[in-house]
């Protein structure tokens, strides 16, 4: 099945995926926000398929806001929209996007010693919930 994504569609996918990593990084600030961001970014740039082609670069010119709440207000709906958009055109690619974001949030949580902090675990839950809402 051939998928046609507009530039706006691609931006939505990038905001969703890269924003999810940013949310995890913010939630992990007590540990190592930089390591969380680096691990999550590696996961995104390692994606394959159409999703991999779209996520090879972070979105340019996006202003996420000054608070984690403002970032979440933009990213969580973008995650749901991305899944819905991809489901309409190719359900397998929607699954690929979901798996890619899940790997990225797992990777972002990895630098924590032992279990992820309650803050990171809760952020991961919110991200997963947004993915599953679609």
Image (cartoon, rainbow, N blue to C red):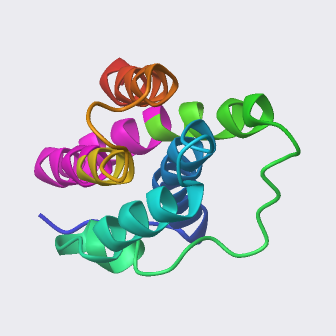
Q: Is residue 41 magenta?
A: no
Q: Give the magenta range.
A: 80-102
**Residue in view at x 79 percent, y 72 percent:** 61
**Residue in view at x 29 percent, y 66 percent:** 43
The residue nearer to you, when weighing 90 against 120, is 120
Quadrant of the snapshot with the N terminus: bottom left
The answer to whether residue 1 is above or below residue 25 is below
Q: Is 31 positioned to the left or the right of 29 in the image?
A: left
Q: Is 18 positioned to the left or the right of 29 in the image?
A: left
Q: Main secondary structure of the magenta part?
A: helix
The residue nearer to you, when weighing 94 against 22, is 22
**Residue in view at x 35 percent, y 32 percent:** 116
Residue at the outermost front position: 113
Q: Is 104 positioned to the left or the right of 27 in the image?
A: left
> Residue 112: x percent and y percent?
37, 44
The answer to whether residue 95 is above or below residue 7 is above
Q: Is 95 positioned to the left or the right of 31 in the image?
A: left
**Residue in view at x 62 percent, y 70 percent:** 59
Q: Is residue 82 magenta?
A: yes
> Residue 96: x percent and y percent?
18, 54
The residue nearer to you, when weighing 52 against 40, is 40
Quadrant of the snapshot with the C terminus: top left
């Amino acid at each position: 099945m051939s998928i046609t994504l507009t530039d706006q569609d691609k931006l939505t996918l990038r905001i969703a995926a890269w924003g999810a990593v940013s949310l995890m990084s913010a939630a992990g600030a007590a540990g190592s926000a930089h390591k969380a961001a680096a691990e999550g970014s590696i996961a995104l740039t390692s994606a394959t398929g159409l999703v991999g082609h779209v996520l090879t670069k972070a979105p340019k010119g996006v202003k996420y806001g000054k608070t984690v709440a403002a970032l979440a207000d933009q990213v969580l709906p973008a995650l749901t929209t991305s899944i819905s958009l991809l489901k309409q055109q190719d359900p397998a690619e929607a699954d690929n996007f979901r798996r890619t974001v899940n790997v990225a949030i797992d990777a972002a949580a990895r630098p924590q010693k032992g279990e992820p902090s309650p803050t990171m675990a809760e952020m991961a839950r919110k991200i997963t919930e947004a993915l599953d809402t679609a």
